[in-house]
Amino acid sequence: MSIRHTYLINGDFNQTLSPLDRGFAYGDGVFRTMPMHHGQPAEWPLHYQKLVADCASIGLVCPSAELLISDMVHLFSAADNQPLVAKIVITRGEGERGYALPAVTHPTRVVMRLPMPHYASEHFLSGVKLHLCKTQLLEQPQLAGVKHLNRLENVLARMEWHDDCFDGLMRDKQGNAVECTMSNLFARFDDVLVTPDLSQYGVDGVTRQRIIWLANTLNLQVRIDVLPYAKLLLADEVIICNSLYGAMQVSHVDGLKLPQHDLAHRVRNALHQ
């Protein structure tokens, strides 16, 4: 099946995004990104659950799962044999100038069909390097864990490197490791898997949550805790994760070599079972 269109706005191939849309003007919205397998979104119940929760956190009504699936059916096909990605964006819709909410809102939903990013095979075999970002994550507990549209901290952090680093490690103002620009973070100390506390900032990703649930099957205990950068460097191994690539071993942070074992490989196998 040949598909010419790459996105739908409110279920319409021909609709455009208004410059008065609050997602465009203020980042007033949320989004989710997920791999598609033969026309079906991977881990859809978890992604939709997160989408509903993120919408609720900023006072948005999330479109129904049926409506979003209907949009994906129009963009993707069971006959798709190349790796593809679906991105869902929900905004508050149009509003007048100013931050005050309109008396009546009509949320905008956008569903996009995108190619899967290319991940080099050596990233899975040899691990990845992380840049140590100077850009800090600032505390905002009302938005903690939410994948909202205002990602300027991540944009500024991503501007910091132009070498072969795969991602950038972001810290808070106390110097604690929190997450990467596009990934969540885990550090193993013996049989304890530590992932940073995201109650004040950061994005609580679906794959992060799945790894927390799967840790038992890997004979690991999980602790959600503050993770000082100095402690991270003492870990037995460090991995990063997101919904598109699964998990990758970290080989270096800021040029410092880290121990490497097989945790990312084991996690990827567990995620695919």
Image (cartoon, grey):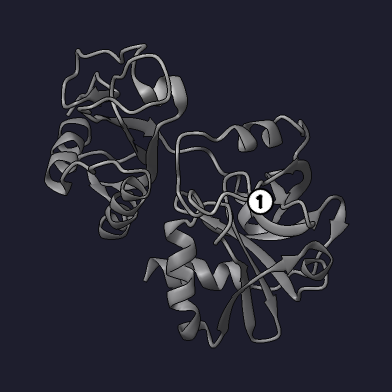
Q: Is residue 83 visible?
A: no
Query: How many C-alpha atoms fall within 10 Å of the one at disc 1: few (<14), some, or many (≥20)?
Result: few
Identified at 23% across, 42% down, the residue is 61
The relative height of residue 239 versus residue 130 in the rendered view (above or below) is below
Instruction: Give the structural element (helix, strand or loop) at label 1.
Output: helix
The foreground one among 71 and 25 is 25
The x and y percentages for residue 155 are 63, 32
Q: Nearer the viewer, residue 61 or 123?
A: 61
172 relative position to 1: left or right: right
- Left or right: 129, with 223 as reference point: right
Task: Return the x and y of residue 114 as percentages of the image width and height.
Answer: 38, 31
In the displayed structure image, the side of residue 215 where residue 22 appears, left or right: left
Residue in view at x 67 percent, y 46 percent: 137
Question: Up-down: is 128 above or below 214?
Answer: above
Residue 132 visible, this orientation: yes
Viewer-proximal residue among 245 and 203: 203
> Is residue 26 shown above or below 226?
above
Q: Going 54% across and 88% down the picture, which residue do you hit?
A: 219
Residue reaching furthest to the right: 256
Residue 257 spot, x, y in % from top left: 85, 60
User: Where is 51 relative to 25, above or below?
Assistant: below
Location of residue 106 (image quadrant): top left
Nearer to the camera, 53 or 2 = 53
| Residue 147 x, y percent position in the rendering | 45, 45
- Residue at the spot of label 1: 122
Q: How many marks?
A: 1
Q: Give the residue at x 44% y 73%.
A: 270
Q: In the rendered view of the protein, which quadrant contains the N terminus? A: top left
Q: Amino acid at mark 1?
A: Glu
The C terminus lies in quadrant:
bottom left
